[in-house]
């Protein structure tokens, strides 16, 4: 009979590796509802359609087209609904290991310490953050401010206001529907040497049923330049997929980028009324 001897140190390393892999795996978000056209841009530059049940991780960007919505549930139990004409970057998504057999949807509180940072490039999202543990964070960031949420239902928007064809202002708004929300506003100025200085205020609480907003007009060159940069980046990402951007328009609610894609027999078409199908 032969015996396999594994040093204790090696066992420890294997155990730690397994824990780290598990932690990386559970730090994710799952799509629980899809309506319309939703796509994902990954860190490697690839763009792909999203469907019910798909898993998102740190670094993924969710793009929601006109007349579309998508619902995400995170590994800490929190849920968001991204509205039409929106783009959201999952900039940070970390979760410590935890035990149990509940699905993300069944969680009623943060099962372990977690950090979530979402960057709303443009658009609107509604959310419900479950009760967070001490040390956990859930934030939604925009160029005009950051919303910090702790156990509440809320709404965050970052949209443009337009007069005809002319953009008048960009508005960041946070509504605390129920619970605890704080907002840190940002202001930007262009210095004499052309550099940009962004100042972030101390977080201030938003009472339940109240809103907090921040805006910049056409005179704020720095933030409008940042907005143009965001649009340019989104267009470049889209065009990497051989799609063609046919128009970019701004209405009172959002930025609308219309795209024309070549026919591809392998394109996955997701329908809100039935399962995914292949052309």
Image (cartoon, rainbow, N blue to C red):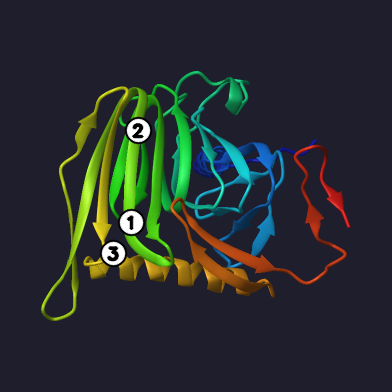
Of helix, strand and loop, which one carries label 2?
Answer: strand
Q: Position of residue 64 (x, y in %)?
A: 59, 51
Left of 130 or right of it: where is 170? Answer: left
Q: Of the residues tagged 1 and 3, which is closer to the observer?
A: 1
Q: Residue at x 86, y 49 (%)?
A: 277
Q: Which residue is mark 3?
A: 223
As measured in the structure, the alpha-carbon distance from the residue carrying label 1 to the one carrying label 3 is 9 Å
Residue 189 lies in what quarter of the image? bottom left
Q: Answer few, some or many: residues within 10 Å of disc 1's Cα (few below 14, many 20 plus, some between 14 and 19).
A: many
Q: Of the residues tagged 2 and 1, which is closer to the observer?
A: 1
The label shown at residue 17 is none
Residue lying at the far bottom in this picture: please name it. 193
**Number of numbered discs:** 3
Q: Do the residues bearing badges 2 and 1 touch, measured as CB atoms within 8 Å?
A: no
Q: Answer few, some or many: residues within 10 Å of disc 2's Cα (few below 14, many 20 plus, some between 14 and 19).
A: many
As measured in the structure, the alpha-carbon distance from the residue carrying label 2 to the one carrying label 1 is 17 Å
Figure check: 206 above or below 185: above
| Residue 115 is at least partly visible in this image | no
Figure check: 272 above or below 110: below
Residue lying at the far left in this picture: please name it. 192
Position of the N terminus, as image quadrant, is top right
Q: Do the residues bearing badges 1 and 3 touch, measured as CB atoms within 8 Å?
A: yes
| Residue 35 is at least partly visible in this image | yes
As measured in the structure, the alpha-carbon distance from the residue carrying label 2 to the one carrying label 3 is 22 Å
**Depth check: 267 or 216 in front?**
216
Q: Answer few, some or many: residues within 10 Å of disc 3's Cα (few below 14, many 20 plus, some between 14 and 19).
A: many
Position of the C terminus, as image quadrant, is bottom right
**Depth check: 46 or 160 in front?**
160
Q: Position of residue 76 (x, y in %)?
A: 49, 30
Q: Which residue is mark 1?
A: 170
Left of 123 or right of it: where is 274? Answer: right
Q: Which residue is mark 2?
A: 175
């Amino acid at each position: 009979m032969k015996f396999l001897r594994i040093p204790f140190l090696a066992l420890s390393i294997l155990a730690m590796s397994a824990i780290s892999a598990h932690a990386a795996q559970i730090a994710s978000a799952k799509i629980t509802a899809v309506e319309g056209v939703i796509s994902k841009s990954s860190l490697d530059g690839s763009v792909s359609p999203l469907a019910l049940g798909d898993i998102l991780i740190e670094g993924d960007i969710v793009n929601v087209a006109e007349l579309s919505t998508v619902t995400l549930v995170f590994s800490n139990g929190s849920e968001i609904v991204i509205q039409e004409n929106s783009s959201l970057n999952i900039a940070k998504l970390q979760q410590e290991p935890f035990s149990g057999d509940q699905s993300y949807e069944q969680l009623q509180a943060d099962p372990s310490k977690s950090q979530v940072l979402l960057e709303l490039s443009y658009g609107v999202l509604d959310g419900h953050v479950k009760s967070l543990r001490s040390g956990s964070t859930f934030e939604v960031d925009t160029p005009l401010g950051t919303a910090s949420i702790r156990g509440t239902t809320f709404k965050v928007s970052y949209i443009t206001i337009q007069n005809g064809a002319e953009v008048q202002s960009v508005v960041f708004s946070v509504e605390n529907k129920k619970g605890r929300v704080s907002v840190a506003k940002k202001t930007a100025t262009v210095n004499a040497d052309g550099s940009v200085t962004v100042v972030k205020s101390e977080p201030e609480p938003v009472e339940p049923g109240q809103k907090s907003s921040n805006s910049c007009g056409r005179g704020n060159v720095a933030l409008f330049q940042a907005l143009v940069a965001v649009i340019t980046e989104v267009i470049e990402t889209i065009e990497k997929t051989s799609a063609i951007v046919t128009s970019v328009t701004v209405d009172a609610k959002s930025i609308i980028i219309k795209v024309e894609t070549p026919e591809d027999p392998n394109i996955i078409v997701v329908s809100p009324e039935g399962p995914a199908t292949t052309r």
